[in-house]
Image (cartoon, rainbow, N blue to C red):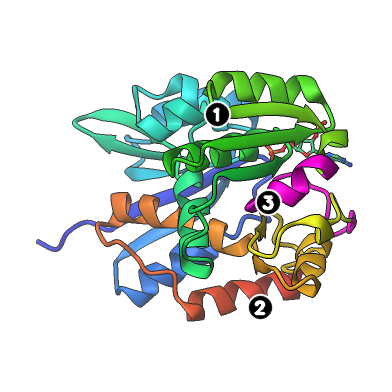
Amino acid sequence: MAEASKKAFVCGHPIAHSRSPKIHGFWLKHYGIEGSYTAIDVAPEDFSAFLKRLEAEGFAGGNVTIPHKEAAFRLVDRRDAAAEAIGAVNTLWYEDGQLWGGNTDAYGFAANLDEYAPGWDKTDTALVLGAGGAARAIVHALKQRSIRDIRIVNRTVARAEELAASFGAGVSAHPLAATGEFLPETGLLINTTSVGMHGNEELPVDPSALPDRAVVTDIVYVPLETPLLAAARARGLKTVDGLGMLLHQAVLGFERWFGVKPEVTRELREMIVADLGAAR
Ligand code: ATR
């Protein structure tokens, strides 16, 4: 008998703009796998019941996005180490009859930089702009790569302090006003705020005072080249856009559900870039 077709999903609220069905759909076709990956809109009050129905509905697992990542963290049976460190779950799968929750955002962040700026982690000092959920995953990735001095600056300092405290030694919190003083000694600058996003296309900081060796990356990918990345490129610095993080974070879920570790290729990236352009 042929193996049953495997099913996976992404759930969020809203979910219409998720690119995940396009990414996983591309890989299913590319690897000739009989399976599906669908977007499901789940309201917050329905999320717990939705998780309970998953297995009966034949799902191998799926992705969880805003606003369910913290609820998923609380509701799964088991969590992987990244989810524990980040406090949020973005990937679900079954193992030994239990519902597991993992977090692939830190992996996606590091894999994107590995691809476009190899050696990015050979710096002692990173400056993280913002202290939301994305910053949490990125600080975890930076700790994993043993970056010794991780500085978080945020408009609301209390949020940065809370984030820094949860990671302990080597991670510090500062007000936005400290940015100017930090820039000349920063080897890696990461924007995790929504500043620079389409509709809010401003510079979160002026990167001109960064050293020549600095790498600059942004998690915003609409537009693909944010004002920060454009300014950093004009300054002659190495820049990496945020789309690769989205593509790479999808790899581990696909592998869990469909049994093949997929490749992030130029063809996949171009398909998503075209889709982002068409949506604007
Ligand atoms: P996510 O979970 O995607 O990281 P978030 O939790 O809403 O999103 O966090 C957004 C980040 O962008 C926060 O660090 C936020 O700063 P505050 O904690 O002070 O709210 C930051 N941010 C958003 N708009 C900003 C702006 N106009 N200027 C500076 N920082 C901004």
- Distance between the alpha carbons at the discs numbered 2 and 1: 40 Å
Sequence-wise, the earlier of marks 3 and 2 is 3
Vertical order, 117 against 256 (above or below): below
Q: Which mark is residue 67?
A: none
Residue span colored magenta: 180-202
User: For the residue labelled by badge 2, is the local secondary structure a helix, a strand or a loop?
Assistant: helix
How many residues crowd mark 2 within 10 Å: few (<14), some (14–19), many (20+)? few
Residue labelled with disc 2: 274
Q: Amino acid at mark 3?
A: Leu
- Give yes or no for contact between labels 1 and 3 (Cβ–Cβ under 8 Å): no
- Give yes or no for contact between labels 3 and 2 (Cβ–Cβ under 8 Å): no
**Residue shown at the point (75%, 62%) measured from the top left:** 222
Residue labelled with disc 1: 170
Screen quadrant of the N terminus: bottom left
- Distance between the alpha carbons at the discs numbered 1 and 3: 16 Å
Image coords of residue 270 (percent x, y)? 58, 79
User: For the residue labelled by badge 3, is the local secondary structure a helix, a strand or a loop?
Assistant: strand
Residue 163 horizontal side relative to residue 153, left or right: left
**Residue shown at the point (68%, 43%) measured from the top left:** 127
Image coords of residue 88 (percent x, y)? 52, 30
Sequence-wise, the earlier of marks 2 and 1 is 1
Vertical order, 99 against 106 (above or below): above
Residue 122 horizontal side relative to residue 102, left or right: right
